[in-house]
Image (cartoon, grey):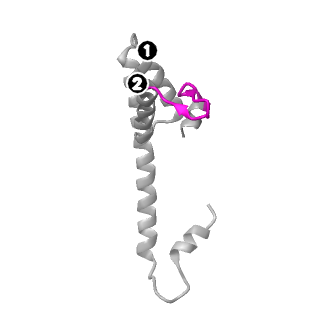
Amino acid sequence: MVRHYEALGLLPEVARTDSGYRQYTTNDVHTLRFIRRCRDLGFSIEEIRQLLALWRDKLRASAQVKHIAQAHIHQLNERIAAMQAMQRSLQTLVSCCKGDERPDCPILDDLGSPL
């Protein structure tokens, strides 16, 4: 992932030894931890890029950071609602299926039905 982050410009290219091993500075490690925490919270690469720029800018307005976080919360809520709707639909289908030895299956019937 480190090479990927370098390629995306999230992490500056790090110094290498003569034998080609990367040499990370304390700042590089701190940046990698920041990126990892952002990824753990589900931020997109573009959002991480914006957050990194704000993190590095000591004159930033915290309102900008809050706006990005609030927009992300909104996206998460939409995804959660969509997943809950999928769960309810699937639970309904499962409750209609007898799950016995017969071949008829309302789950497969629904999956195969035209939209």
Q: Total marks drawn?
A: 2
Q: Does the magenta stretch include residue 19?
A: yes
Q: Relative to the observer, which residue lies in front, 102 or 34?
A: 34
* Mark 1 to mark 2 CA distance (whole Å): 16 Å
Classify residue 111 as left or right of residue 91: right
Which labelled disc corresponds to residue 57?
1
| Residue 93 image offset from top left, x and y in percent | 46, 70
Residue extent of the magenta highlight:
7-25
Q: Mark 2 points at which residue?
A: 67
Q: Relative to the observer, which residue lies in front, 113 or 65?
A: 65
Q: Which residue is drawn at 38% across and 30% down?
A: 70
53 shown above or below 45: above
Q: Residue at x 43, y 30 (%)?
A: 29
- The mark that comes first in sequence, 1 or 2, is 1
Give, as a three-letter code, the residue at label 1.
Answer: Asp
Label 1, secondary structure: give it. loop
3 shown above or below 99: above
